[in-house]
Image (tube, rainbow, N blue to C red):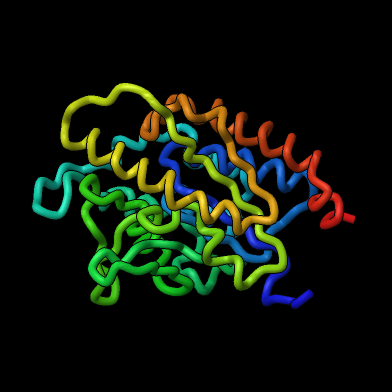
């Protein structure tokens, strides 16, 4: 078998507040003795990936974000490019990240965004972390695009909501954690709700192929009833992420082989 650049790669999907399940998944991986050699993150996954790669434990990341009302970071920006901007969130990241640039992170990390003009993937492996995480989180029509190096960037989930796509050529083993299950049901008939539902349908479709690129997939289904933006359930979401991940890890022959 071909030996690749990294042994274990961890792909963390987008999912809004359901990204707290990534924290639970990291706790479970820590408990069974798995530490990734490289991480790729999209949107919420890029937030967790950045802090973890900067040296913070799963518990430290939860303590930082668990009591925060994320709505306080949102500012109205009624322009042709979007409804909300994330300038306050960017400042929060800049203040709390112990490392400022991607290339300086303790674990190699890919922050995945989308170049909306050139219509292709933007896998950032260097540059200011906060700016690139905000780009990775910028859902089209909901948040303003972020201009980086002359390109307008939006949420990486537009093309690959589970970033195993970026890790497969680099890693012997790819573990994917998907925290964005689709919830069916009624929708409010306003522009923001329709735009977000359309985005969810798109990410649900593009994640199918990326799931197939994983050697081990953790699909956290039990969090589908939680709202994308409701931080009040952060602890419950993290717990579900832990228990669902641990159940899969304990039953995986791959994990047994990796931890021999």
Quadrant (top left/top right/bottom left/bottom right) for the C terminus = bottom right
How far from the left and from the top, in percent, is residue 231?
42, 30
Q: Nearer the viewer, residue 160 or 57?
A: 160
Residue 87 shows up from this direction:
yes
Give the side of residue 36 with respect to residue 193, left or right. Answer: right
Which residue does the image show at 45% across and 47% down from the upper left? 14
Going by the picture, which residue comes out furthest to the right? Answer: 260
Give the side of residue 121 with respect to residue 249, left or right. Answer: left
How far from the left and from the top, in percent, is residue 211?
57, 51
How far from the left and from the top, in percent, is residue 86?
27, 50
Question: Which of the 4 image quarters holds residue 127?
Answer: bottom left
Which residue does the image show at 61% across and 30% down from the upper left? 240
Residue 94 shows up from this direction:
no
Quadrant (top left/top right/bottom left/bottom right) for the N terminus = bottom right
Give the side of residue 148 with respect to residue 219, left or right. Answer: left
Question: Which of the 4 image quarters holds residue 168?
Answer: bottom right
Going by the picture, which residue comes out furthest to the left? Answer: 79
Going by the picture, which residue comes out furthest to the top? Answer: 186
Q: Is residue 231 above or below residue 61?
A: above
Q: Nearer the viewer, residue 254 or 139?
A: 254
**How many numbered badges does the structure rendering display?**
0
Q: Is residue 30 above or below residue 99?
A: above
Question: Which of the 4 image quarters holds residue 94?
Answer: bottom left
Q: Nearer the viewer, residue 90 or 37?
A: 37
How far from the left and from the top, in percent, is residue 171?
66, 68
Which residue does the image show at 75% across and 42% down from the upper left? 249
Which residue does the image show at 75% across and 77% down from the upper left? 2
Give the side of residue 78 with respect to residue 98, left or right. Answer: left
């Amino acid at each position: 078998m071909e030996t690749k650049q990294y042994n274990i790669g961890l792909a963390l999907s987008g999912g809004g507040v359901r990204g707290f399940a990534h924290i639970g998944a990291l706790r479970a991986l820590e408990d069974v003795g798995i530490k990734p050699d490289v991480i790729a993150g999209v949107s919420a996954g890029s937030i967790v990936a950045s802090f973890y790669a900067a040296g913070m434990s799963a518990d430290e990341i939860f303590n930082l974000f668990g009591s925060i009302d994320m709505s306080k970071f949102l500012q109205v920006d009624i322009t042709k490019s979007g409804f909300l901007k994330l300038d306050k969130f960017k400042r929060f990241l800049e203040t709390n990240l112990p490392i400022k640039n991607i290339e300086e992170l303790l674990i190699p990390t890919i922050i995945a965004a989308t170049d909306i003009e050139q219509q292709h993937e933007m896998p950032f492996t260097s540059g200011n972390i906060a700016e690139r995480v905000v780009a990775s989180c910028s859902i089209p029509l909901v948040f303003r695009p972020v201009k980086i190096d002359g390109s307008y960037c939006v949420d990486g989930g537009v093309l690959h909501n589970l970033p195993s796509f970026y890790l497969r050529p680099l890693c012997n083993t790819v573990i994917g954690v998907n925290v964005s299950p689709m919830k069916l049901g009624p929708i409010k008939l306003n522009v923001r709700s329709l735009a977000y539902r359309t985005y969810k349908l798109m990410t649900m479709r593009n994640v199918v192929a990326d799931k197939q690129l994983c050697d081990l997939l953790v699909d956290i289904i039990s969090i589908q009833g939680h709202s994308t933006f409701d931080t009040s359930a952060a602890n419950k979401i993290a717990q579900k992420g832990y228990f669902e991940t641990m159940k899969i890890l304990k039953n995986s022959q791959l994990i047994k082989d990796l931890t021999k």
